[in-house]
Image (cartoon, rainbow, N blue to C red):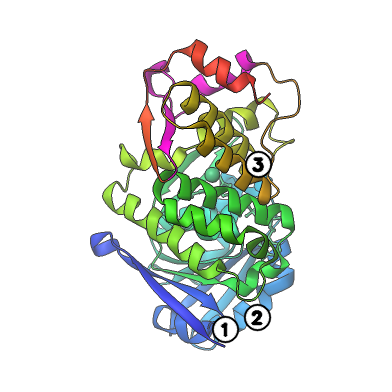
Amino acid sequence: MNRMQTLRIELGERSYPIHIGSDLNAAELLAPYVTMKNVLLVTDSNVDRLYGEKVQAELGKNAASVTKFVFKAGEGSKNLATVENICRAAVRAGLDRSSVFAALGGGVCGDMTGLAAALYMRGTRYIQIPTTLLAMVDSSVGGKTGVDLPEGKNLVGAFFQPMLVLMEMNLLRTLPERELSNGFAEMVKTAVILDGELFETLERSAPELLRLSPGSPIAETVKRCCELKGQVVAKDERESNLRAILNYGHTFGHALEAVTGYTKFAHGEAVSIGMCMAADLAVSEGLMSGEEAQRQEALLREFHLPVDAGESVSPEALLNAMEHDKKSAGGKIKVVLADRIGHADVFSGIGREQIEEAVSGRL
Ligand SMILES: NC(=O)c1ccc[n+]([C@@H]2O[C@H](COP(=O)([O-])OP(=O)(O)OC[C@H]3O[C@@H](n4cnc5c(N)ncnc54)[C@H](O)[C@@H]3O)[C@@H](O)[C@H]2O)c1
Ligand SMILES: [Zn+2]
């Protein structure tokens, strides 16, 4: 059955649609964007094995040509060297400014392809076909593109919006469970900061969602997350203020990833622990009730996400890493805290001792 919902991200002349559903007619949906154009399909080595040929054929039904560029799967490829290789492949494939890049993959693929599209001939257009839950609910919405440097993650990039995002739920069926859980961490985050009703839906359906059972509200909840993130981005495209609430759990999470050398925790896992730290802090500051913090923790557990670091990271090391995070402007630690499930704000006046106290309970 072909069920599809379409959402529009409203960004003036940079507005674009997101099609969400199962058994989508990809060739037909892609046609308006690729007909008679040269396309460079960028994908990683895992996704290529599963879906590369199929998507190349779907694009090829209407495109003038479709050339595939495959990079080695993993965050280790998310660097300027790969972007250079993507651009060089585009030259060889005859792409010009009217040509199109298509990203088929997770956040790594989307972030790099978006950046390559922004740079190639001073700007071409690109399409996102996200294949991880994280990419669907997070990285493919909002137009942040970028790569890592040896000095740190996502240090080079651009805001550059795609012209279309195609979200096919069936692609998630091959995703390893750990990757799926990572995506659910971001969904829980969105629900906690913006939508109590979405949170309740997740509470009711977590086991079916995790199994991607037929009849589970996966497409609906993905759509709602995109809608919510889209609204935030529409009001604050370049992250001056409001968009910062999307970093809920992330200031703690990024620090945890950094102090554990990016090996122990997947991003969503670190964010899950970070959200627990944020909730503990919110409770100790008298902002959130203990019962709501408990509900958040229970839901994270339902999605098989960790709620404490389970190893001896010193609170001090974590705080130092938080101060280095690029989101903590001027040395002061900014934290996003929820005052209830469904609403959050940025707080910058909380003392280092209080934060240290709150994080120590999860280390
Ligand atoms: N731009 C943004 O706003 C934004 C937001 C959040 C995260 N990110 C970035 O996203 C990246 C993380 O994204 P990710 O978690 O999607 O990682 P990823 O792209 O590395 O994908 C995770 C793993 O899943 C595999 N995979 C992807 N789709 C699959 C499928 N359908 N079936 C089987 N395996 C599949 C990949 O090959 C990879 O091994 C990070 O680099 C992060 O910085 C960007
Ligand atoms: Zn995240």
Tell me the tag on residue 54. Answer: 2
Q: Residue 325 in magenta?
A: yes
User: For this rendering, which residue is in front, 196 or 252?
Assistant: 196
The picture quadrant for ligand 1 comes to: bottom right
User: For this rendering, which residue is in front, 354 or 40?
Assistant: 354
User: For this rendering, which residue is in front, 268 or 305?
Assistant: 305
Secondary structure of the residue carrying tag 2 is: helix
- x and y percent of residue 94 in the render? 50, 72
Give the extent of the magenta segment.
Answer: 315-341
**Disc 2 from disc 1: Cα separation:** 6 Å
Ligand 2 within 8 Å, label 3 CB:
no
Tell me the tag on residue 58. Answer: 1
Q: Residue sitting at 76 percent across and 25 percent down?
A: 311
Q: Do residues under tags 2 and 1 come within 8 Å of each other at their CB atoms? A: yes
Quadrant of the image for the N terminus? bottom right
Q: From the image, tell me which residue sits under label 3.
A: 269
